[in-house]
Image (tube, grey):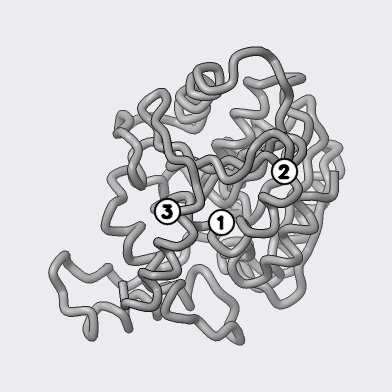
Amino acid sequence: MTDAAQRQYDALLATARCQQASGLAWQQWSDPSAGPRLLLLHGGFGSWNHWFANIDTLRRQRELWTLDLPGLGESADIEAAAVPADFAARILAGIDALWPGDRPLELAGFSFGAMVGARLAEQLGQRCQRFTAIGAAGWGELHVQVPLTPPPRPGTPWETAAPVHKANLRALMFSEQFPIDDLAIHLHADNLARARFNSRALSRTDDFIAALSAIEAPCLCAWGSADATAGDSEALASRQRLLVELGAGFELLPGIGHWAMYEAPAAINELVLAG
């Protein structure tokens, strides 16, 4: 990272209580007095820092937790053939270890993390009070696989690597009008450097839709209208119709891309806290 981005990252992480449970790296950002418990799940090839722009606000109103999914960030690996339900089972084991008892929680997931979150909400049953999915993958033929430039090899000089990362962020993560800053580039590059699990094939399955029908909690699914993975307006309308059939909510964020939490943190915070 650049020095400025590194300082931003270090300053926020220094405010978390970091611990291990079930082979996963967990970050606790506030205590139970802050409000209901909320767990945030990040996207594929990512880490907790996909929620970087949201943490300061959410931790004031929730007992806020994040984690690194298996095979990503600082968490232990998972089998290459693992499916979202396997990820969810690993997280549930950590929940039971960290939080004895059956106190309920709220759940929000982004992209591949929304797929995992749907299976976790299913496994939690009535313990899950609300599930918010941002830019969820797992929609079968409706999911758009965005072509990307191969990421720079380890050791590539930053002056050469940064433009490649920025171009891929523009193609996949952000709308055309969003000014991509150094922090976003560095968070993305750091996440890629630590990623060992490839979730792209799972993102093309219909696992999210299959899980959604089994969730007992109220569900809200949101996409940016400029989310490159969501398809055109007709595809978004198809998603909305299916969600209505399944009894889930649908929210469209005009002009926002895939990494909506970073591009439009206030709008996402409002959705996550709306329950």
Q: Is residue 209 left or right of residue 240?
A: left
Q: Earlier in the sequence, mark 1 or mark 2?
A: 1
Task: Give whichever of discs 3 and 2 has the lower sequence position.
Answer: 3
Marks 3 and 1 sit apart, C-alpha to C-alpha, by 10 Å
Residue 266 place in picture, x, y as percent: 73, 66
Q: Which residue is mark 2?
A: 62
Q: Residue at x 38, y 78 (%)?
A: 4
On the image, the x and y values in percent for residue 39 come to 62, 39
Please say if 48 is above or below 107.
Answer: below
Q: Determine which quarter of the picture holds residue 270.
A: bottom right
Pointers 3 and 1 in contact (CB under 8 A)? no
Q: Secondary structure at mark 3?
A: loop
Q: Secondary structure at mark 1?
A: helix
- Labels 1 and 2 touching (C-beta < 8 A): no
Q: Which mark is residue 46?
A: 3
Pair 3/1: label in front: 1
How many angstroms separate mark 3 from mark 2 (CA)?
23 Å
Q: Amino acid at mark 3?
A: Gly
